[in-house]
Image (tube, rainbow, N blue to C red):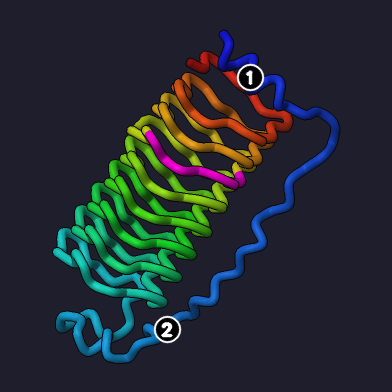
């Protein structure tokens, strides 16, 4: 329909390719927050090494983990609503069914993270890395995710209405059955990806660049 035509008009052929994200996490194993007083305020059991730690079902809402390394951590069903996770290392973590609504994840490393059924509504993830992450039935409603890297992410289902994906880089990403109504994709680069049965009514697509991408059944 008209929407597919709008996207196809922005598609570019040739061998041009988008470089892989230049993001390099400053988070190191065992890193602690910049403000040492924050560590003292954390509950018992959260002040030491959090790599691979099982924090499933814990109420961690409103706490600051800024700059901490939680790579490989189990956070299944945990509540992190309003938590400060800026510049946090969460690569390989399991955040399925976790509540991260309103959380700050700017600059976080979420590569290879399981975000299945996770609630990220109104969260901020500017500059975050979500490469190879899994987002199945994830709620991203109203989230701000500007200039994030989504390389090789798997996105299926979920409510992404009104999400801000300005400047996003989507390389080899598969997006299926996702509601992006009213979303902002201004300046996004989508290459070597699949967009299938994606709803884009009222979405802003200014300056979108699409290269060698499959577009099927877009509304």
Q: Residue at horizontal 45%, vertical 58%?
A: 110
Which numbered disc, 2 or 1, marks the residue that appears first in the sequence?
A: 1
Q: Is residue 6 left or right of residue 89?
A: right
Asked if residue 185 lies in the magenta stretch, the reply is no
Coordinates of residue 77 in the picture (x, y in percent): 20, 53
Camera-side mark, 2 or 1: 1
- Look at the image and give the residue range highlighted in magenta: 162-169
Give the class, few, some or many, for how many residues have Cα within 10 Å of label 1's Cα (few <14, many ≥20). Answer: few
Location of residue 4 by image quarter: top right
Location of residue 30 by image quarter: bottom left
Residue most toward the right? 14
Magenta span: predominant SS is loop
Coordinates of residue 136 in the picture (x, y in percent): 37, 37
Q: Residue at horizontal 34%, vertical 70%?
A: 52
Coordinates of residue 43 in the picture (x, y in percent): 16, 80
What is the distance, in whole Å, between disc 2 and disc 1 at their CAs?
46 Å
Above or below for 126 versus 165: below
Tag 2's secondary structure? loop
Q: Is residue 109 left or right of residue 93?
A: right
Tag 1's secondary structure? helix
Give the class, few, some or many, for how many residues have Cα within 10 Å of label 2's Cα (few <14, many ≥20). Answer: some
- Residue 31 has which mark? 2
Q: Residue at horizontal 84%, vertical 36%?
A: 15
Q: Tell which of 41 and 142 is nearer to you.
A: 142
Q: Is residue 74 left or right of residue 189?
A: left
Residue highlighted by disc 1: 6
Asked if residue 163 lies in the magenta stretch, the reply is yes
Q: Residue at horizontal 49%, vertical 80%?
A: 28
Above or below for 199 versus 137: above
- Residue 184 has which mark? none
Q: Are marks 2 and 1 in contact (CB under 8 Å)?
A: no
Coordinates of residue 193 in the picture (x, y in percent): 62, 33
């Amino acid at each position: 329909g008209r929407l597919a035509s709008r996207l196809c008009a922005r598609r570019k052929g040739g061998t041009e390719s988008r470089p892989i994200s230049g993001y390099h996490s400053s988070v190191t194993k065992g890193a602690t927050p910049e403000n040492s007083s924050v560590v003292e305020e954390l509950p018992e059991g959260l002040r030491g090494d959090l790599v691979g730690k099982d924090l499933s079902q814990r109420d961690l809402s409103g706490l600051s983990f800024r700059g901490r390394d939680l790579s490989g951590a189990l956070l299944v069903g945990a509540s992190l609503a309003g938590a400060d996770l800026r510049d946090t290392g969460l690569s390989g973590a399991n955040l399925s069914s976790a509540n991260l609504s309103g959380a700050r994840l700017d600059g976080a490393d979420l590569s290879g993270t399981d975000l299945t059924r996770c609630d990220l509504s109104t969260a901020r993830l500017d500059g975050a890395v979500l490469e190879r992450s899994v987002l199945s039935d994830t709620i991203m409603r109203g989230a701000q995710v500007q200039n994030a890297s989504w390389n090789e992410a798997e996105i299926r289902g979920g409510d992404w209405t009104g999400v801000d994906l300005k400047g996003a880089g989507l390389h080899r990403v598969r997006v299926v059955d996702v509601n992006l109504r009213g979303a902002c994709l201004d300046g996004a680069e989508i290459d070597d990806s699949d967009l299938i049965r994606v709803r884009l009514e009222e979405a802003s697509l200014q300056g979108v660049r699409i290269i060698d991408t499959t577009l099927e059944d877009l509304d």
